[in-house]
Image (cartoon, helix red, strand yellow):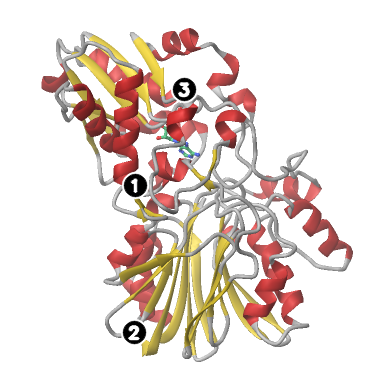
Amino acid sequence: MSGIIGIIAKEPVDVASSIYYGLFALQHRGQESCGIAVNDDGVFRTFRDNGLVNDVFTPERLSDLGLGNMALGHVRYGAEGRNNRTYAQPLVINHIKGNMAVAHDGKLTNSQELREELELCGSIFHTTSDAEVISYIVTKERLVTNSIEDAVNNAMNKLKGAYSMCIMSPSKIVAVRDINGFHSMCYGEREDGTYIVASESCALSAVGATFIRDLEPGEIVVFSKEGVRSITDHCNKVKKSMCVFEYVYFARPDSVADGCSVHEARARAGAFLAQENKVDADIVIGVPDSGLDAAIGYARESGIPYGIGFLKNKYIGRTFIAPGQAAREDKVRIKLNVISSVVKGKRVVMIDDSIVRGTTCKKIVKLLRDAGAAEVHVRVTAPPFIAPCHYGTDIDDKEALIACNYTHDEICEIIGADTLGFLTMEHVLQIAQGEKCTGFCVGCFNEQYPTEVPKTKYKNKFTEKISEKK
Ligand code: AMP
């Protein structure tokens, strides 16, 4: 999972600072690495590194990027190539017809095949990332087409799976959403005619742009000095299957994705939980951040008062949000503290967004018990995870998923709750409502994927060599 932002201004300005603020708003989508590429009349200046936006981009580094009329930015969640700065994006490629920068969010399902095909033709890869595969495919197409958008249009015949991406050429920014529309992508405009395209609408607000619209699944939107042009050759080819987990966990609650407010979707999930899983209790609390909106929905629907049960430390640096099991376990206590007076002696309904491996929830329930909660009833705004995600959400293999290894009652006992309730499949499909909320991917909850999925995980000598280096 990643966050992307692109900007195209009428004239050379400090585009790097706008990208910086946009990336800051998208930080929740990836904390492993970040990067900015500025386009100064066809000359690309880039800085990419591991770390949070705030740490990587010092005022000096931002000013070194200089002025430009276009820029791309990327934040990356490190599902693979953790701690390896070679994986940081945007990638910048020089080819015989010019140069381009690529920022990608999602996961291709056929990257292994594409990569092997390319390697057999002599391509050399530095990483196992999809962004590199995409760069090669688009570059190859660029050599036989007259424009970057035609190259991207052709490349889409080859790319399968999840890819929301932005490609910057010397004179254009080309934004793309895959045919299934797995992840969100939208654009907006500032009063001065600057266009911004981003993974989530919260990034548009952060840079003072007014939301115009979401990209349609399969759509290519080209931004240039001539204005905005849409290419729809790949639209309406398959049924839409937006990742429902964007609404449950990934997106920021102040974002609106495909016409549905993420806050409203979460509140609705909470209300559904209250209908499905009634319990006598004194207070409803949410696990920050993604459980809070749902807790409000649960409280409204059930009539049980809403309370603020946890204080979240807002100043946690990269050490505590680095992905990986060890970090996940250590961070809980530092990240969350219970407000004892709210829960002491009370029967508490605790709303969490999801249980993946079960370790986090167990620790949070214990925090409540230690603070004197009389009962803890855990309600989860997603169904149990029973299958890996092939589209970019870092959901592990089955062995690591608690719901694959234990029954409902066993999970309740393991996490130390009095009762446990998950959102049903029927209801998770209804949390995002609106004209454009027409189809969702719920593969991680029912193992039915909307596309073909890879039969084996990509791992060869090359991958192993990279991980040895870390
Ligand atoms: P656990 O059950 O210990 O694996 O942790 C579940 C918690 O991790 C959830 O409540 C979310 O806050 C968070 N989470 C869920 N899915 C992901 C993911 N794909 N990547 C990172 N964090 C996640």
Residue type at mark 1 is: Val
Instruction: Determine whether, in the image, residue 399 is placed left or right of residue 30.
Output: right
Q: Nearer the viewer, mark 3 or mark 1?
A: 1
Q: Position of residue 7 (x, y in %)?
A: 42, 76
Q: For the residues marked 3 and 2, what is the alpha-carbon distance in whole angstroms?
A: 48 Å
| Residue where numbered disc 1 is placed | 262
Q: Quadrant of residue 144?
A: bottom right
Depth check: give the residue in front, 260 or 3. 260
| Residue where numbered disc 2 is placed | 193
Q: Position of residue 464 (x, y in %)?
A: 74, 45
Crowd tier of the residue under label 3, counting other residues whose Cα lies within 10 Å: few below 14, some 14–19, many 20 or above: some
Tell me the residue at 73%/64% (across/down). Answer: 157
Q: Position of residue 33 (x, y in %)?
A: 49, 57
Tell me the residue at 67%/69% (across/down). Answer: 135
Residue type at mark 2 is: Gly
Depth check: give the residue in front, 70 or 85. 70
**Marks 3 and 2 close (CB-CB < 8 Å):** no
State whether residue 170 is above or below residue 79. below
Is label 2's Cβ within 8 Å of ligand 1?
A: no
State whether residue 136 is above or below residue 239. below
**Marks 1 and 2 close (CB-CB < 8 Å):** no
| Residue where numbered disc 3 is placed | 358
Q: Is residue 9 visible?
A: yes
Residue type at mark 3 is: Gly
State whether residue 247 is above or below residue 14. above
